[in-house]
Image: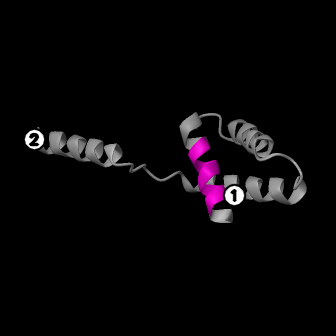
Amino acid sequence: MIKRWLIRFGLWLARANGWMPPSPEPLLTTARELVQEQQRRWSLRAGETKRASVYRSLMNIYPTASRREISRAIEEAICLDC
């Protein structure tokens, strides 16, 4: 009982300080590929348009993933591309 409470408290404390669990690897890999393709293909389009296109594609590929996971995977893919 106390062990479970301590684990929950530790996770709450970590999340309160900005920790997020990592994105699933297949989702992150697909996001990287789609972001690179959008940047290579549509260099003159606005950033939000590219992001929306990648977001829509990932929603179609991974329909069970949460919106938060998909958004975070896109942001991680963009940060890795910098």
Q: Secondary structure at mark 2?
A: helix
Find disc 2 in the rendering and name its residue.
Answer: 2
Task: Name the spot of residue 41 as percent of width and height, x first.
Answer: 89, 56
What residue is drawn where x is 18% and y is 41%?
4
Question: Count the marks: how many?
Answer: 2
What residue is drawn where x is 29% and y is 45%?
11
Residue 52 relative to residue 5: left or right? right
Q: Secondary structure at mark 1?
A: helix
Q: How is the model colour-coded?
A: one colour
- The quarter holding residue 1 reads top left
Cα distance in 3D space between marks 1 and 2: 41 Å
- Which contiguous range is marked in magenta? 71-79
What residue is drawn where x is 82% and y is 45%?
46
Work out whether residue 62 or residue 31 is closer to the camera in this orientation and state it: 31
Q: Residue furthest left?
A: 2
Magenta part mainly helix, strand or loop? helix
Task: Name the spot of residue 27 as percent of width and height, x first.
Answer: 62, 50
Residue 79 drawn above or below residue 62: below
What residue is drawn where x is 81% and y is 57%?
39
Name the front one of labels 1 and 2: 1
Q: Say which amino acid is labelled 1.
A: Arg
Q: Please tell me how crowded label 2 is: few (under 14), some (14-19), or many (20+) other residues with Cα within 10 Å.
A: few
Residue 32 falls within the magenta-colored stretch: no
Residue 29 relative to residue 15: left or right? right
Find disc 1 in the rendering and name its residue.
Answer: 32
CB atoms at circles 1 and 2 under 8 Å apart?
Answer: no
